[in-house]
Image (tube, rainbow, N blue to C red):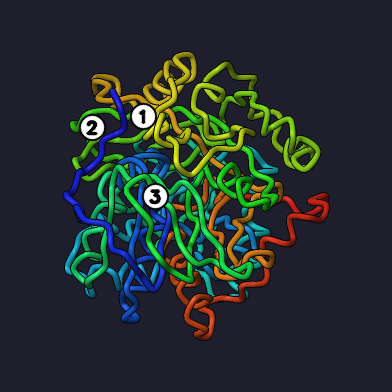
Amino acid sequence: MPAPLFHIETTPTLPETADAVVIGGGIVGVFSAYYLARRGMKVALVEKGRIGAEQSSRNWGWCRQQNRDARELPMATKSLALWDAFAEESGEDAGFRRCGLLYLSDNDAELAGWARWGEFARGVGVTTHMLDSKKASEFGAATGKAWKGGVFSPTDGTADPSRAAPVVARAIMALGGSVHQMCAARGLETTGGRVSAVVTEAGIIRTETVVMAGGAWASSFCRQLGVRFPQAAIRSSILSVAPGAKSLPAALHTAAVSATRRSDGGYTLAISGKARVDPTLQQLRFARYFVPMFARRWKSLAPGGMEGLKGGHETLSHWRLDRPTPMERNRILDPRPDRKQIDLTLARARTLLPSLVHAPVSAAWAGYIDSTPDGVPAIGEIAAIPGLILAAGFSGHGFGIGPGAGHLVADLVTGATPIVDPKPYYPDRLNRSAWGKVADF
């Protein structure tokens, strides 16, 4: 029962040249290509499998400012406006709704942390409301229990993970760009040290600008170019239930379980932060970079199995450009969900939200969340290879800030004034220690 995904038909013929080539058809890749196309550039987007088929369709769909790390908050704020604008500009429906996000807790320390974040956020113009016990219990009436407190962020919302990336890809084509599914980018050619072409399984595209937005595959791709990009992925398992539950919040987070209303009226259910660490050689290679993050989050992570090695996305091998690559052998990362976690998630959800007791499970799936050592994305030009822009390592935050990330990529490519300060995202920061810098949320 895989994650639902809206399939689209894309461009059959590869162009010989392009002003820019975007590698990766997830939410960051499609929005990067979309904003480049809106600026009149001839853009080609290549995706080894299906648009949006990996983590961009396997997440909760939250588009939030609430509890964002300070480095990501400006991009989150801009992204909300861009989600709104995309629907007006393109006529496409990515399922974005400002439904508000509700957080409930009985933990004093957690509530105090949310309150501190709220003080900071209000100072930068973000609307967030702390809820006392009475208000929290009213907002959380569907749980049938009293709560110590909570937070409600009314201007935040959700989009539809099953539709968002595909409809943005359709908008790219409407602007004159080309989108190519089942077309893996095997590597790059350079001239005088600068990007000059992308080598794909279907042929070569001549270009001087490439955006690497390959998600969990980005580090292994960069390795082929001699670029060191510390990245590790964890396997997260979630499920959805069929429509039928009544009077539930559109988006609810608690320590026990979180629930998000889907476009079809069903709900996505997950336990925040819970994941398996599937060992790979790449993880061993970059282990020392991730010690600070593991020290912060070890209680939420559990040892995994062989899924990571089977996936091939964290290989240390080098491949030839005239032979099939690991990306062609595994078009879509579709790891086995953790059955124990799925069962626990469903049990917790039915205990917390009684109206879900009779809602049947409609799907269960897993996905790989790629992370940087500090939990903040890497967005910027690779100094060693002029013309190569990296946009990866979104650490479980990429779906909601996809529009802002794509806009920033387009700004960097075209020399426009950046939509947000790009310095917190520069890839070269990852060469330094992450101690004291790991994202709080």
Quarter of the image where the N terminus is located: top left
Label 3 is placed on what type of residue? Thr
**Of 109 and 333, the residue lying toward us:** 333
Task: Work out whether mark 2 precedes mark 1 in sequence or the reverse, and give the earlier one.
Answer: 2
Q: Residues within 10 Å of mark 1 (few under 14, many from 20)?
A: many
Which image quadrant is residue 233 in? top right
Q: What residue does disc 1 label?
A: 353
Direction from residue 264 to residue 332 in the image, left or right: right
**Of 234 and 41, the residue lying toward us:** 41
| Residues under numbered marks 2 and 3 in contact, where contact means CB atoms less than 8 Å apart | no
Task: Work out whether mark 3 precedes mark 1 in sequence or the reverse, and give the earlier one.
Answer: 3
Residue 434 rendering spot, x and y as whole percentages: 79, 51
Above or below: residue 40 compared with residue 103: below
SS of the residue at dot 2?
loop
CA gap, disc 2 and disc 3? 46 Å
Q: What residue does disc 3 label?
A: 200
Above or below: residue 331 compared with residue 80: above
Q: Residues within 10 Å of mark 3 (few under 14, many from 20)?
A: many
> At 30% across and 27% down in the image, what residue appears?
2
Q: Nearer the viewer, mark 2 or mark 3?
A: 3
Label 1 is placed on what type of residue? Leu
> At 41% across and 41% down in the image, what residue appears?
59
SS of the residue at dot 3?
strand
